């Protein structure tokens, strides 16, 4: 069975390629400092393990609302308020399988063929391919001075009539950098009809 033209057009994940190379080197006994996939070094909290085991033991496993169960959404609202001092309503919370899944769902919802999405560099390697999977065009904005902080003027220069969204990866993966208040205090892409941030 042949795969679709869209699937053939998607570039191989550099992260998965790096993971494979690191695994091969480790298997050969070579010392490897692996900077590929960001796996947490901490163990899963025991409370989470016990709660999950308890739920499985009850055998009460059913489909949940697509945007998340109400108790979890309320917990996310509490966490957001306590951790960031920002109050959101449960109607503005959607639980997903992860940030990339949420972002892809958003892109599929707002993009039309030939739309453009600004992606500030450095960026997580999946973002441009996700935009292409929506038949849109990623526009990469590099910072010429080598800093990891996007400059407003570079983003504004990249915006055009086809710009539909801006993806700002913050804290930046893989660098860990975050835009300063100076960078993030202005509205980006005034001509864009929609904006997306990650």
Image (cartoon, rainbow, N blue to C red):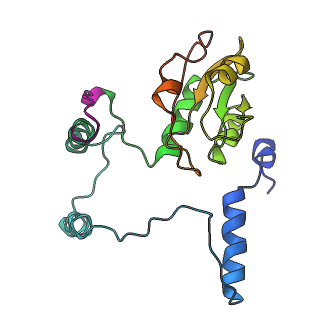
Q: Which residues are magenta?
A: 82-91
Using the image, determine if residue 172 lies above or below residue 110: below
Q: Is residue 27 above or below residue 179?
A: below
Q: Please state if 40 lies on the left or on the right of 104 as rendered.
A: left
Who's the residue at 53% across and 61% down the image?
A: 38
Q: Is residue 176 left or right of residue 51?
A: right
Residue 88 on the magenta span: yes
Q: Residue at x 35, y 71 (%)?
A: 43
Taking depth in this image into account, of 69 and 171 the one nearest to the observer is 171
- The front one of 92 and 109 is 92
Of the pair 76 and 147, the residue shown nearer to us: 147
* Residue 49 drawn above or below residue 8: below
Q: Would you say residue 155 sits in the magenta stretch? A: no
- Image coordinates for residue 188, horizontal then vertical, percent: 57, 18
Query: Residue 174 at what x, y percent from top left?
Result: 59, 52
- What residue occupies the far bottom of the structure in this picture? 29
Q: Whole-percent x and y of residue 88?
A: 27, 28
User: x%, y% of residue 99?
Assistant: 48, 44
Q: Quadrant of residue 68?
A: top left
Quadrant of the snapshot with the N terminus: bottom right
Name the quadrant containing residue 16: bottom right
């Amino acid at each position: 069975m042949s795969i679709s033209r869209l699937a053939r057009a998607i570039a191989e994940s550099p992260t998965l390629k790096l993971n494979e190379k690191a695994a091969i080197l480790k298997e050969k006994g070579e010392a490897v400092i692996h900077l590929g996939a960001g796996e947490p070094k901490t163990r899963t909290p025991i409370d989470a393990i016990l709660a999950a085991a308890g739920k499985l033991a009850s055998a009460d496993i059913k489909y949940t609302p697509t945007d998340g169960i109400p108790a979890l959404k309320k917990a996310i609202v509490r966490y957001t308020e306590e951790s960031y001092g920002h109050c959101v309503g449960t109607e503005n919370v959607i639980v997903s399988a992860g940030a990339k899944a949420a972002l892809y769902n958003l892109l599929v919802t707002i993009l039309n063929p030939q739309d453009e999405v600004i992606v500030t560099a450095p960026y997580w390697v999946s973002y441009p391919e996700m935009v292409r999977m929506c038949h849109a065009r990623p526009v990469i904005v590099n910072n010429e001075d080598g800093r990891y902080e996007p400059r407003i003027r570079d983003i504004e220069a990249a915006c055009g009539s086809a710009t539909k969204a801006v993806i700002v990866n913050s804290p930046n993966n893989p660098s860990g950098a975050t835009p300063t208040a100076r960078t993030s205090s202005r509205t980006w892409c005034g001509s864009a009809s929609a904006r997306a941030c990650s």
